[in-house]
Amino acid sequence: MKRLLLLTLLLPGLLIAQHTIKGKFTPAKDYNFALLYKVNPTISDYVTNAEIKEDGSFEFKLDSTKTKGTYRLVYAVPQEDYNFDIIYNGKEDIELTFNSETGVEFIKSTENKLLAAYTNSMSMVTQSIGNYFSQESEDKKALKAIFKTQKETQENFEKAAQGTRALAFIKANKPYVPETIEPVETYIANLKAHYFDYVDFNNPVLQSSSFLEERMLNYVFGMSSDTKDEVENYKENIDVVFGHMKTAPKEVQRILLFDLWQQMADLREEAVANYISENYLMDVAVKLNDQQLLKDLILYKNLSKGTVAPNFNIEIEEKGKVITKKLTDLKGAENYIVVFWSSTCSHCLDEIPQLQKFVNTFQKNKVKVVAIGLEDEPYGWKNLTYDYPEFIHVYGKGKWDNKIGNAYGVSSTPTYFVLDKDKKITAKPLDFEVLKEYFEVGEE
């Protein structure tokens, strides 16, 4: 009975036994909150949050139910851009500092400090190799010594990391080390050829981190070619990356390929984004029955430059009669500006008069504006259309649930598209100033 009573008294203490992740952000005024997630191969689970105090300090308390693994600390939005990973082994408290200029530094944590030391050591060796080749040195003994240091550094850290989660990252990052001295061109070619030799896309530890994404992006954007243009080089690099990830679970492929697709879309590399979609990502979406992803990829392709813009009906007055035409039926202008706006949008009410003034500076038939008003009701919009008699006006009933707006992927107003005389999309300016610049450069 006494033993049972003792166990009962100890059990609550065992359950609430905890470790902490704490640290300090600088400059403190730039940060307000911190969120903590547990990273898994296909999803990140929310764990907890903490306020960042006036001095920049924060603290997460992890009870005994929090298992070892990789955790992600988010400190701003968008979350996918402002975060860093932390290894938690379930045995120790973690303390760190973070600065927007220098990044994260671990003050207390065996595994995180070990991984950071490895990264710094290998970075210094890599820099030494770069300096050797850039200085066109012919001291082969010096280069042999650098490669010997690189090999020994890798071996020593692998030994030191035995039994830790950090070992997976250290082994996956193992660099190519030549057996004999190579010309710089050969060395660079071999670096590229052996870049993924030790990267296992099926490793759940690597999947539960940002490592695979960073490795992929570094290869695609970092491995250039003197014989191919940028787009073809990207495509070739993407083929190589997929060749190494093709045995990984489809869910993992989706995450990585979508991240890469999004990077290209954000950079407005439409040809490359569509290459990823058509050759790899759509197939993954089909196999996962991810209908929303398929819809988004098709929409993006349909709105890429060089494609005919989605068609829609337009009511115009000719010879005193109102007739219905299609966008593709319009004639007489060299360029068409399709602008989505709203009578309740303050930015629109500022930019639409500027658009009118700007378009009126061109010769007749140079530019024609087709203005689609996304509205909940027509009355305010109709009154405003009289201020712009030279525009072709279209009523977009339903505002954000409008067929035309949806076909053009409109999520904010104003949104601009520039079409040529054949109604092919030639530009998608982000705002009015970019629209002006597009035409002004074209006039030069």
Image: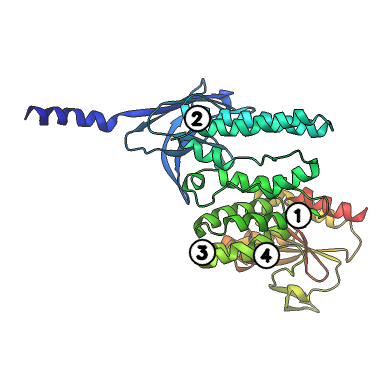
Q: Nearer the viewer, residue 362 or 3?
A: 3
Name the N-terminal-most of marks 2 and 3.
2
The numbered dot on residue 388 is none
Tell which tag, 1 or 3, sits nearer the viewer. 1
Spatial separation of the CA atoms under disc 3 and disc 4: 17 Å
Task: Please name the residue that numbered disc 3 is placed on.
Answer: 290
Task: Please name the residue that numbered disc 1 is placed on.
Answer: 233
Task: Please name the residue that numbered disc 2 is placed on.
Answer: 160
Task: Please name the residue that numbered disc 4 is placed on.
Answer: 301
Sort mark 1 into few (<14), some (14-19) or many (20+) by Cα contacts within 10 Å: some
The amino acid sitting under disc 3 is: Asp
Tell which tag, 2 or 3, sits nearer the viewer. 2
- Looking at the picture, the colour scheme in use is rainbow
Q: Position of residue 80 (x, y in %)?
A: 56, 43
User: Where is 211 relative to 424, above or below?
Assistant: above
Sort mark 4 into few (<14), some (14-19) or many (20+) by Cα contacts within 10 Å: some
- The number of callouts visible is 4
User: Does residue 172 appear in the picture of this structure?
Assistant: yes
User: Where is 216 relative to 145, above or below?
Assistant: below
Spatial separation of the CA atoms under disc 1 and disc 3: 29 Å
Spatial separation of the CA atoms under disc 2 and disc 4: 49 Å
The amino acid sitting under disc 4 is: Lys
Tell which tag, 2 or 4, sits nearer the viewer. 2
Spatial separation of the CA atoms under disc 2 and disc 3: 43 Å
Q: Are marks 2 and 4 in contact (CB under 8 Å)?
A: no
Spatial separation of the CA atoms under disc 1 and disc 2: 38 Å
The residue positioned 47% from the left and 49% from the top of the image is: 41
